[in-house]
Image (cartoon, coloured by chain):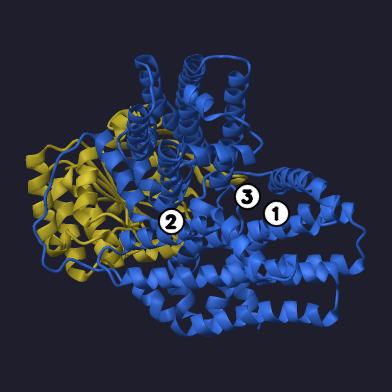
Chain colours: A blue, B yellow
Amino acid sequence: MSKFFTLLRASMSEGMNVFRLHGKKQSKWFRIGLPILLGAMIMFSVAGYADMMMEPLAEVEMEFVVLTLFVIISAVFILMEGIYKASGLLFNCRDDDLMLSLPVKKTTVLAVRVLKFYLFETMINALILVPAMVMYAMRVEVGASFYLVSLTALLILPILPIVISSLLGGAIAFLSSRFKYKNLVQIVLTTAFLLVIMYVSINMKDILQTLAQNAGSINEIITKLYFPAGQFIQLVLDFRIVDFLVFVGVNVGILVLMLVVLGNVYYKINSRVRMVKTNTVLHDYVIKKHRPLVALVRKEAGKFASSPVFVINAGFGLVLYVVAVILVCTNMDSVIDMMAKMGVEISAEAIINYMPACMFGLVFVMSMTTSITSSMISLEGKSFNILKSLPTNPVKIILAKVLAAAMIMIPIFLIGDMVMFVRFDFDVWQMLMIIASSVVMPMVAELVGIIVNLKYPKMDAKNDTEVVKQSMSSMVAVLVGLAASVVMVYIIYSGFNSGLSATEVVGAGLVFGIMVLGLLVVYLKKWGIKEFNAINV
Amino acid sequence: MIKILNVTKKYGDKKALDNVSFEVGDGEIFAFIGHNGAGKTTLIKAIMGIHDFDEGEILINGKSIAKEPVACKKEMAYVPDNPELYENMRAIQFINFICDMYEVDLEKRNKNIKKYAEMFEMSQNLNDTIDSFSHGMKQKVALIAALSHDPKILIMDEPFVGLDPKAVFDTKEVMREMVKNGKTIFFSTHILDVAEKLCTRVAIIKKGKIMKVGSMKEVKGDKSLEKVFLELEK
């Protein structure tokens, strides 16, 4: 057991130190204060949302429904994140050779990795559930048992999504390892699973209706929908020690069972995943000359394509963009319905009239929330020294990263633009401005991403997943992107309400985007190089 | 020519390099030796412009690495101590990438890649991805990439680690051939026998300070380099 905790401690000190900045001196206030500040911001937002939802439910004394909702949101979030995190955190670790050489049981190594994965997801679970629980406790008179159940639930509820995502991640890793182009297969399979989960989540209304027809009570519906949530709500409403023990026992039992099942095949899967196929036949090679910037862009694009977690993380947003464009073009009613649910009452005619501004908003939001470059410096790892030794200006190296990322996004936005131009009436100016926005906004987003990554590099990650999903840089970039998106959507909506035309809104947005782009380029030239040179690996 | 003038590099309060000064002339094979953590890699990275330094100056053929890094780097090639290359690339892609960055013309790169790939017995592996290679094979790829652009100055950090005996022999031969053509080779090593037989000049570093520097004869006198090194370490 002591070996288990020694391994766990070593593993945690490496991977969980999200807020430690590479090679930079940090004050205690920064190290402790920043995660607290970010966590508080998220929790405060969730608390506000939970309180708002509880308001109408309080009239019928059903505030617990909000708890259920947040339990399910957390579970879906962990499940979606977990599927592609699992393949990196459990099956593609750079410390495999060291771990496998240690005199510990094979299941111990797996258990340490699963526990590390679990602890990280538990933190995310807590960010979502604690505010909801606090708001519930403030509104409803709760006994001591509520606190016991809630604290236990914070630890227990992430188990099932983690078990499912680990098994799915394992299955994807195993299946893809059987193919020559295993990365491509892994990307396709993971995206397919994520789309299925999304489809199920979106169509939850139909599922709930079916469940409601076949269930005697709301709690029965919840239990049928997601049994740990049902168990939890049952305990919140009516605490019984036997139910409590069942709640803990069943979930922990599932985790143990998964460790046993996966433990038996873990090394088979892992050795297959790590197996590298070599070309024994093809010996002729082609040498082509490229300009340095082109060579750098090609290098970055190659790195992107070789990392499934990187592709899925960035690509999923782009897939959603395509889905959104198709939805707007083919099923306007569902868009109006969706907006009504969000409290925005708007007619189809108004949307069509305002389509250029909506299109601009969509490109902006998708650009800002798809930050590819926020991982690109960190993913260099120790090979960063090769880059620094090259006879080229760091600006060119940074620019290549931004261009490679933008080149992944821009074609998809341009295709979306063309589809929208065919479906809706845009005048020439509007079309030109939308096309320009589809080029400028991804550049702005990727410049922001690279600046954030230069500021918060993580050069010692054990795998790509730690960089793409669990690094300070990727988190800050996502938060900045989300905040900017909220502001932009608000501005567009305000423009609409104040009678500005769509062309005026897009024009103003584009000019603003170009100005920000210019400022970011100046910043990068002036301070970005300093940040680049200050990264010592 | 490399001129290192009063270079000091600090990590916090600790001096990794303490007022280091020496020169490496054209046509010299210069060995840089010292125990683990003495400051060898720090100085090599400073010469290559990978790390900055707090005081002093490093001149590469008369140009300052701090002020004209791109011009300096164009004259040099670097073989890192741990060949952390781009694992997703095929060997040929990596070598070609380095050639692109040094803007090597097609004829020259074709000739050099063929020459060095054959020398290091890597012709059959150039189409394989680097992540399938052993440490030694990665080291060979790093060497081929460094040599393929025909640098005036070759900087190597423990180049012989992980290489098979034939590759070690071939590397030494390449080094001899390069200095015959007036080029400069600066490398760190722990293999003192090789340094003693191969190098024209040597520097010994201890805790960031240069303890001895000069021609092999000046540094070791009638003793072996190993003995001199161990005496300095006491």
- Using the numbered discs, state the Cα–Cα distance from disc 1 to disc 3 in whole angstroms: 20 Å
Marked residue chain, label 2? A
In this view, the mark in front (2 or 1): 1
- Using the numbered discs, state the Cα–Cα distance from disc 2 to disc 1 in whole angstroms: 24 Å
Kindly identify the amino acid type of the residue bearing the numbered disc 3. Answer: Phe
Question: Counting other residues with Cα less than 10 Å from the Cα at mark 2, is it few (<14), some (14-19), or many (20 or more)?
Answer: many
Q: Which residue is mark 2?
A: A309
Picture coordinates of residue A212 (x, y %)? 66, 65
User: Which residue sits at x=7%, y=47%?
Assistant: B111
Residue B133 falls in which quadrant of the image? bottom left
- Would residue B151 be found to the left or right of residue A529 on screen? left
- Would residue A281 be found to the left or right of residue B87 on screen? left
Marked residue chain, label 1? A
Mark toward the start of the polypeptide (3 vs 2): 3
Q: Are marks 3 and 2 in contact (CB under 8 Å)?
A: no
Q: Is residue A47 above or below residue A413?
A: below
Q: Which residue is mark 3?
A: A19
Nearer the observer, A57 or A145: A57
Q: Which residue is mark 1?
A: A128
The answer to whether residue A20 is seen in the rendering is: yes
Nearer the observer, A353 or A172: A353
- Would residue B221 be found to the left or right of residue A314 on screen? left
Marked residue chain, label 3? A
